[in-house]
Image (cartoon, rainbow, N blue to C red):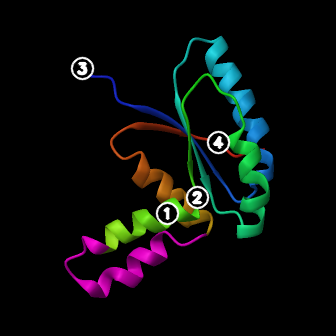
Amino acid sequence: MQAKDLFFVIPTYRLRDVGETVQLYDEHFWRNGHAVRMIVFDDSSPSAQEKYYPLLEQTQTHNELYYVGPREKEQFLGYLTGRLRDRKLTSLVKNLFRPSYGGNRNCTLMYTLGGLMVSSDED
């Protein structure tokens, strides 16, 4: 049996609080001998992203840390809609991944497809 990729995801719209959360989880994983790919899925407003992303970017971790924000989601959505055989489905696909609680969760599921995922809030 092959081990599946393990992902620890943090879907958020409050990027301000994420850096500390990432550090605490990362320290816990490292102390207990776990190697986990951590991914932050951000639906913050553009002003909040501009203000708090640099703080997250400076966060030092033992585990790999990735960020999926509006730009990355737009690229992903472009890829998905480009692969649609029926253009009438474009609005449905865009709606599935729109900035919202459910849309952000849908992104976490697509990005970790085929792996094992653990999800936690930023607080």
Disc 4: CA contacts within 10 A as few (<14), some (14-19) or many (>=20):
few
Observer-nearest of 45 and 2: 45
Rounded to the nearest whole Å, what is the CA distance between mark 4 and mark 2? Answer: 17 Å
For label 3, count other residues whose C-alpha is less than 10 Å away and answer few (under 14), some (14-19) or many (20+): few
Disc 4 or disc 1, which is closer to the eye?
A: 1
Q: How far apart are marks 1 and 2 (CA)?
A: 6 Å
Which tag, 4 or 1, sits closer to the chain's start?
1
Q: Which of marks 4 and 2 is in front?
A: 2
Q: What residue span does the magenta drawing correspond to?
A: 82-99
Please identify the quarter of the rendering in which residue 90 is found: bottom left
Location of the N terminus by quadrant is: top left
- Please provide percent x and percent y for residue 14: 76, 56
What residue lies at 70% left-to-right and 21% top-to-bottom?
27
The quadrant of the picture occupied by the C terminus is: top right
Name the mark on residue 69: 2
Q: Name the residue under label 4.
A: 120
Disc number placed over residue 1 in the picture, else none: 3
Q: Residues within 10 Å of mark 2 (few under 14, many from 20)?
A: some
What element does badge 1 sit on? Answer: helix
Residue that badge 1 annotates: 73
Question: For the residues marked 3 and 1, what is the alpha-carbon distance in whole angstroms?
Answer: 33 Å
